[in-house]
């Protein structure tokens, strides 16, 4: 089988596939004023057949893991059909979704039946009032019920994404640890990143994940080995805890050395980096099954343009509008 490889000998096994830009939450670090179409209607997002074709091309190029993202991907009415379409590719061993979780209690069993293997849920606070303040939605209990429903549906582990913010949740580590002590949850703290319009928020609330890492190591947590299709999290485990802790620290030196991910946007552009460039159009090659070879050639050829690093340290936020781009 072919394998996507760039000029720095990095191999790419993992695709983040956005299927909508629409979201119904108004998180302070992401869409504080709510979703704005910016010229894109729901009809402009990749169709089911286009999703089928692009996932097939990546599968033929060695992709083992696909994560469906948004926006909020479960807002697509054909979400179960999308899951099934991606799972038509036997080489894709892992099919995950990142969701705000508000529909999980109702629909998670259907998603699993359609072929979903892994789930990430965004939960930035375990306090219902603070959760409401961060997300703009009073849905904390519904999201918690959705996590319980995921276990009831047969998921052996749930990943929870928490954006780490100074003076918001950075001092709540012990509360989070108590929550995962008896639950098979991998709680992943994602450093707040500077986005296009979020400079003031970043300067006010950014704190390095290294602060939590030092606390974890001091309490006996141990770093785990990373497999080739894993996301960027440094994962820690502890013998007294059923759950795990992950740290995603994009500002740390050498963050990009182990890059194994590419991204396709909801309008069909291939992004070689989650941060720094405008993307390579693929959509003109997604109209017909007969275009598969040309599509694969364009994806493979585009990798020659991938840079060695994301240049976040130089203030380059690129296309990054929200942290849904990075949570793995």
Image (cartoon, rainbow, N blue to C red):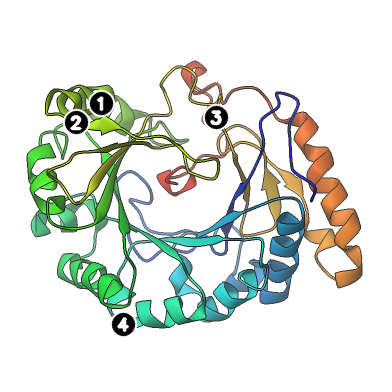
Mark 3 to mark 2 CA distance (whole Å):
27 Å
Residue 82's quadrant in the figure? bottom right
- Residue at disc 3, secondary structure: loop
- Pick whichever, 303 or 276, lies toward us: 303
Q: Residue 326 at x, y = what percent?
A: 46, 42
Q: Nearer the viewer, mark 1 or mark 4?
A: 4
Name the residue that disc number 1 marks. 207
- Residue at disc 2, secondary structure: loop
- Residue at disc 1, secondary structure: loop
- On screen, residue 49 versus residue 155, left or right, reads right
Mark 1 to mark 2 CA distance (whole Å):
6 Å
Mark 3 to mark 1 CA distance (whole Å):
23 Å
Spot the residue most to the front: 239
Q: How many marks?
A: 4
Q: Nearer the viewer, mark 2 or mark 4?
A: 4
Q: Earlier in the sequence, mark 2 or mark 4?
A: 4
Name the residue that disc number 2 marks. 166
Name the residue that disc number 3 marks. 258
Q: Residue 196 at x, y = what percent?
A: 47, 35
Q: Is residue 172 above or below residue 219?
A: below
- Residue at disc 4, secondary structure: helix
**Disc 1, disc 2: CB below 8 Å?**
yes
Which residue is at 27% across, 22% downward? 210
Q: Earlier in the sequence, mark 4 or mark 3?
A: 4
Name the residue that disc number 4 marks. 106
Q: Nearer the viewer, mark 4 or mark 3?
A: 3
- On screen, residue 91 versus residue 3, left or right, reads left
Q: Is residue 25 above or below residue 151?
A: above
Badge 1: how crowded within 10 Å, few (<14), some, or many (20+)?
A: some
Mark 4 to mark 3 CA distance (whole Å):
37 Å
């Amino acid at each position: 089988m072919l394998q996507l490889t760039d000029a720095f000998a990095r191999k790419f096994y993992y695709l983040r596939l956005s299927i909508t830009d629409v979201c119904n939450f108004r998180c302070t670090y992401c869409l504080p004023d709510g979703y704005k179409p910016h010229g894109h209607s729901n009809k402009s997002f990749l169709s089911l057949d286009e999703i089928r074709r692009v996932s097939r091309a990546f599968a033929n190029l060695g992709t083992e893991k696909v994560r469906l993202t948004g926006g909020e991907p479960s807002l697509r009415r054909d979400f179960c059909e999308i899951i099934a379409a991606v799972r038509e590719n036997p080489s894709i061993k892992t099919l995950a979704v990142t969701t705000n979780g508000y529909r999980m209690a109702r629909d998670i069993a259907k998603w699993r039946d359609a072929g979903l293997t892994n789930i990430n849920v965004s939960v930035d606070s375990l306090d219902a009032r603070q959760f409401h303040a961060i997300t703009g939605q009073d849905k904390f209990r519904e999201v918690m019920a959705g996590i319980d429903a995921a276990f009831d549906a047969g998921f052996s582990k749930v990943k929870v994404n928490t954006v780490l913010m100074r003076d918001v949740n950075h001092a709540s580590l012990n509360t989070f640890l108590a929550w995962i002590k008896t639950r098979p949850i991998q709680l992943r703290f994602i450093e707040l990143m500077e986005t296009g319009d979020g400079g003031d928020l970043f300067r006010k609330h950014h704190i390095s994940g290294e602060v939590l890492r030092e606390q974890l190591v001091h309490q006996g947590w141990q770093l785990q080995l990373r497999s080739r299709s894993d996301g960027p999290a440094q994962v820690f485990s502890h013998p007294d805890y059923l759950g795990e802790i992950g740290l995603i620290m994009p500002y740390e030196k050498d963050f990009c050395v182990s890059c194994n991910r590419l991204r396709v946007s909801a309008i069909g552009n291939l992004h070689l980096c989650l941060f720094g460039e405008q993307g390579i159009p693929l959509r003109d090659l997604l109209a017909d099954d007969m275009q598969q070879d040309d599509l694969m050639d364009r994806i493979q050829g585009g990798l020659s343009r991938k840079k060695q690093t994301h240049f976040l340290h130089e203030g380059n936020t690129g296309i990054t509008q929200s942290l849904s781009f990075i949570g793995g």
